[in-house]
Image (cartoon, rainbow, N blue to C red):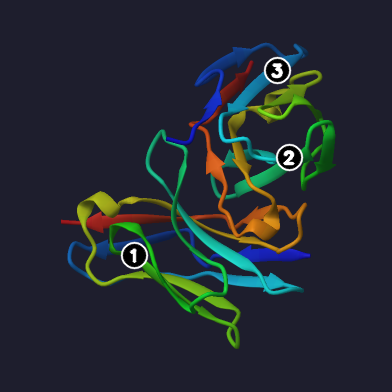
Amino acid sequence: DVKVTQSSRYLVKRTGEKVFLECVQDMDHENMFWYRQDPGLGLRLIYFSYDVKMKEKGDIPEGYSVSREKKERFSLILESASTNQTSMYLCASSLPGQSLAEAFFGQGTRLTVV
Amino acid sequence: AQSVTQLGSHVSVSEGALVLLRCNYSSSVPPYLFWYVQYPNQGLQLLLKYTSAATLVKGINGFEAEFKKSETSFHLTKPSAHMSDAAEYFCAVRSTGANSKLTFGKGITLSVRP
């Protein structure tokens, strides 16, 4: 059974903290994604990685960075957490775009910044 | 550039009634289109996908969608709603390039009345 695992379901962090959200997939997928989900705004792409050490900015990269040192792991980093980064964060992985394959999602991490 | 429009944020139907959730896309190249469902406190699960093999696509749980190029639409339907269909539904588009992003609409919440 395919699996995308996010390290935490719930996190509470303080303003100004550096926050790491971890995502691991066991499907040997090249592509990995980080989204944030907010009511009424749907899923917005933060960053996208199409291979190890390769990344592209999504629609809302400001305040975030990512790391992909190994194929199976994609980390989202909040350099200095702010209250407006309180959200649900979803990680996904897929085969490359031309493979016709869908993305598989983790369960999400609900981050609260206080 | 690619985008997805899901009109309306909430649809309410009676149990046994037809479900119709609308999705219109914009893409400069032939797209891949997806419908995902999200149940409360869970990640996203694929319902169905269009990859140009057939314009009418059948998915899980009795859902289907029809790709209409002339209308740039990919509406989701189910002949008879069940209480368990209550969830949030997302339409998504992806282009066919190797490093293509996956772009989501804002989502529609489906409520099913007894």
Side (left or right) of A26 relative to B80? right
Q: Is residue B78 above or below residue A78?
A: below
- In which quadrant is the N terminus of chain B drawn? bottom right
User: Which residue shows up at 36% across the image and 56% down it?
Assistant: B110
Report which residue position mark 2 lands on.
A46
Identify which residue, A105 or B39, lies in the foreground. A105
Q: Is residue A90 visible?
A: yes
Q: Are marks 1 and 2 on the same chain?
A: no
Residue B106 horizontal/vertical position (percent): 57, 55
Residue B6 lies in quadrant: bottom right
**Number of other residues with Cα within 10 Å of mark 1, as a class: few under 14, some 14 to 19, many 20 or more:** many
Residue marked by disc 1 = B63
The percent coordinates of residue A25 (x first, y second) are 58, 30
Q: Chain of mark 2?
A: A
Chain bearing mark 3: A
Mark 3 and mark 1: Cα distance apart in space: 37 Å
| Chain identity of mark 1 | B
B97 horizontally vs A91: left or right: right
